[in-house]
Amino acid sequence: MDHFPIFLSTKGQRIVLSGGGDAALAKLRLLMKSEAKISVYAPAPAPELVQWADADRLTLHTRALQLGDVLCAKLFYAADEDDVEDARTATIARAEGALVNIVDNLHDSAFITPAIVDRDPVTIAIGTEGAAPVLARAIKADLEERLPTTLGTLARIGKGFRKMADALPFGRPRRDFWRDYYFNAGPRAVADGEAAVGAALDGLLSDHVTRAARPGHVAFVGGGPGDPELLTLKARRALDEADVVIYDRLISPEILELARREAQMIDVGKEGFGPSTPQETINDLLVEHAQSGAQVVRLKSGDATVFGRLDEEIDAVDAHNIGWHIVPGITSASAAVAAIGQSLTKRGRNASVRFLTGHDMKGFADHDWANLARPGEVAAIYMGKKSARFIQGRLIMHGADRTTPVTLIENASRPEQRILETTLDRLPVDLTDAEMTGPALTFYGLAPRAAALAATEILQEEMA
Ligand code: SAH
């Protein structure tokens, strides 16, 4: 970094500029935002310059800059857009002790003026050391769009409120309060004027003081298979009250929408065999946030107690004496079996049902295949797409009938739900053809009830 960014105090300081054309006007528009005393030297000033001088926004001298004109000035701008004249004025300014900027001449300048996003008192300066002005302008445009124009007002009012916020414990509770103010309560109130912002701040503070008094807690919440209407009332309430939501990849955006607007949302999505947030990191996050007093919702897909590594997280929380509870959810086997209009158990067919995982931490998971291979058995296989061929092989090896029905329900309960009806024999081939990319539950030993399929999409017919 050659050019080191600083914010220079300009109150009562002198800034001198030589020039009266477009380059001068552009610089002056920026400089007039400061509190400096600005002197301009221009033998032929543009009309705007004369207006600004008349309005006392700067002092205009309608002559060329001379020796002694830059004395006591902090900054000098050579903006005559003429190499010879700029060199002459810059030499005077340097001799008289000012830092010099020559417009469009990085090499001979002692400082550069950044692109500025102005939300006074919040000011963002963007510089590329002259390397990429286009980039600086693009970043500026992007920020201009993203930062509400009322940000400055909010910062000014917030500054006056800082002492009051000391009522909150230092650290996270105070940080959360300010985040809430700047990104939620503040922007909402500011449309109704500054008095409304003050009132919002008061309300917000008492809200946060009560919240800070509560000890941190973790709710392990089952988010269900995807349809927000399949959330329990308790899950909705927990989301409503959460300070922090730590959620998995399979949680649908519609469900995340239901979280308190102020809640901090943390994505710890894990993908089958793909990249994942290490379990230890998730455990640490739970402990860290709960210890800082947050009401944490650990949102897991389906039911948190089914193939969710829940016990490891409970152990981590328990080890730090943090309170927790479990909110049950609808597991995907329940949603999937509903989609095919069947029962998980049926008198005379199966008196038990197994929940299996296709793979575990060591790879493809092993099970009591011989038992499962008997007629009438039913299993709900989670994470079973990649292991389909392995499971097929094991079952056939143990004598399972090749014509045993197998049904895959992809994206159960979601708008993109698809059903694939096949048999043990055809499972790997049909699965490959179906190109399923969403989460899918495999039922071994269950075929869709005809009436249920009539009402939904039939993948096999569509593919034929
Ligand atoms: N705790 C979750 C399961 C987590 S393991 C539950 O109770 O449902 C992840 C596996 O769940 C996926 O590989 C898939 O087999 C299944 N799954 C999750 N959501 C699903 C959905 N909407 N439709 C079908 N299967 C789903």
Image (cartoon, rainbow, N blue to C red):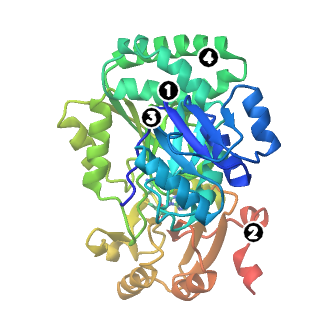
**Disc 1/disc 2 C-alpha distance (Å):** 71 Å
Q: Position of residue 366 (x, y in %)?
A: 29, 74
Location of mark 4 (residue)? 197
Circle 2 SS class: loop
Front residue of 266/145: it is: 145
Q: Given contact means CB atoms under 8 Å apart, are the residues at marks 1 and 2 in contact?
A: no
| Circle count | 4
What amino acid type is highlighted by mark number 2? Answer: Glu
Location of mark 3 (residue)? 72
Label 4 or label 3, whichever comes before in sequence order: 3
Location of mark 1 (residue)? 11
**Disc 4/disc 3 C-alpha distance (Å):** 42 Å
**Disc 1/disc 3 C-alpha distance (Å):** 14 Å
What amino acid type is highlighted by mark number 1? Answer: Lys
What amino acid type is highlighted by mark number 4? Answer: Val
Q: Given contact means CB atoms under 8 Å apart, are the residues at marks 4 and 3 in contact?
A: no
